[in-house]
Amino acid sequence: MTDRDSQMAGLRPVKAVVIGASAGGVEALLTIFAGLKPGYRLPIIVVLHLPDERRSQLAEVFARRVALPVREAQDKQPIVPGTLYFAAPGYHVSVEHDLSLSLSQEEPVHYSRPAIDYLFESAADVYQQRLAAILLTGANQDGARGLSQVKQSGGLTIIQDPDEAQVATMPRAALELFQPDCILPLSGIGRLLVELEHIECY
Amino acid sequence: MQRNTDIELRLLIEAIYLKYSYDFRDYSGASIKRRVNHALRQFDCNTISALQERILHDPSAFMQLLQFLTIPVSEMFRDPEHFLAIRQEVVPILKTYPSLKIWIAGCSTGEEVYSMAILLREEGLLDRTIIYATDINPRSLEKAKQGIFSLENIRAYTHNYQKAGGQRSFADYYTAAYDYAIFDKSLRENVTFADHSLATDSVFSETNLISCRNVLIYFNKDLQNRAFGLFHESLCHRGFLMLGSKETLDFSDYSKQFTPVLKQERIYRKL
């Protein structure tokens, strides 16, 4: 059995993917999205910490380099399969039970708004075991607690290999809380995204 | 089978409605759940049921909980480009009206109210304007009425004010005392602060302009539609509606009944 097969063997179908990243995140995200083809069917929702600029160019930057339609999350926006959503700067983003996105200006978590924990916890509550959550490079603790909630709800939890991460604080914080399902380099996470779509069933 | 916490949360919200007439039943689920969980720790309750018992039998505990359920996050001239757009695109039209009624819905602790009042004064409109500033949280309204804000925020507000096209020195509008900035009370001479719920109350006046920013994000679609309905009913023909920078009418039942004037700045007019 190849390394890849063993990583993919335990996969189960999911309805959505959530991703959190901080320092070094833009590069990491571009790497894992590089293999996605037009027509990819899973929705992907991303919280990426950025300096507090009011008008983020993130969606535009990624739209030019990713095969999926890219949107900045708007309040009450329905989650459309095959779309990549970025949290807007200054707002937490949550998944609602009617599969729409909600924004909020509650207190920052770990000095961050948007917070990865908010996205992960709300998505875990809605999708339960039908969720994959990925925590990438970053210089703070945000996302660790949310990822452990995903695990508790039966979802698939993935962290970037801390040895490879540009800043390892974030994936290590998750490791201190619990043992995620997969610890992968970016190349493996990119392949996993493709594989998750192959086995998903709508 | 529903999870216990989901059952308990629904019961708590129902109890609050039955006992205190505050209606959180159509608030955004994710956010209300998070805030109740946060309150559990502060109230030292192990379950939502325990919290429910506390607030049912102790009105002062409910008033404390209300502070967790509402989000008093605001700043003066928040999103300065929004206020600049009002100044440049909306004020010239407002100047053609002999008198103005403005409704600031969900005014929280008053930052939006004072920002609007300052802008209107600089444009020579404040004297012929009545502002209705409403909120469901009596403590927030009380703070708004006082117009006293922490001095540590003033630097950021000043920066916003300047970016929003402010014409004077921001310090002209307040007196600094200890750690506070006390805003000029003439700014609120024509302001009526009132308790009003977008979830349970009806329209109280015809208005020319409604500003409701970062309030609707805490509502689900049904309650958003109710609020948009109230705004539509209150606004005069071609009246203005201002929303928060990530809020939109696009996903509501009222998208066809308003037209964006400046979509990016979330300024709409009633059709």
Image (spheres, coloured by chain):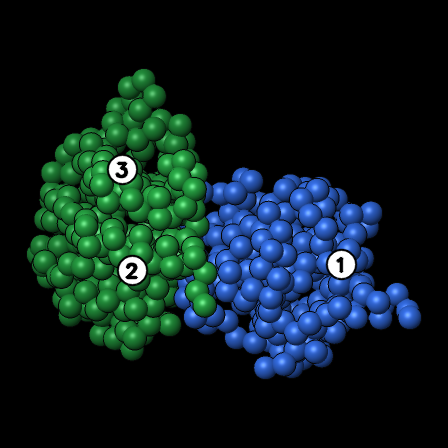
* Image quarter in which the N terminus of chain A is found: bottom right
The label number, if any, that marks residue B61 in the structure image: 3
The residue closer to the viewer here, A166 or A42, is A42
Residue closest to the far right: A1
Q: Residue at x 67, y 44 (%)?
A: A177
Are callouts 2 and 1 both on one chain?
Answer: no
Q: Separation of disc 2 and disc 1 at Cα? A: 39 Å
Amino acid type at image mark 1: Cys
Q: Is residue B262 visible?
A: no
The label number, if any, that marks residue A182 in the structure image: 1
Are callouts 1 and 3 both on one chain?
Answer: no
Q: Looking at the image, do the residues carrying marks 2 and 1 touch, with CB atoms under 8 Å apart?
A: no
* Image quarter in which the C terminus of chain A is found: bottom right
Q: Colour of chain A?
A: blue
Q: Residue at x 15, y 43 (%)?
A: B193
Label 1: few (<14), some or many (≥20) within 10 Å?
Answer: some
Q: Mark 3 belongs to which subunit?
A: B
Q: Residue at x 53, y 55 (%)?
A: A121
Q: Which residue is mark 2?
A: B25
Horizontal side, residue A199 vs residue A128: left or right: right
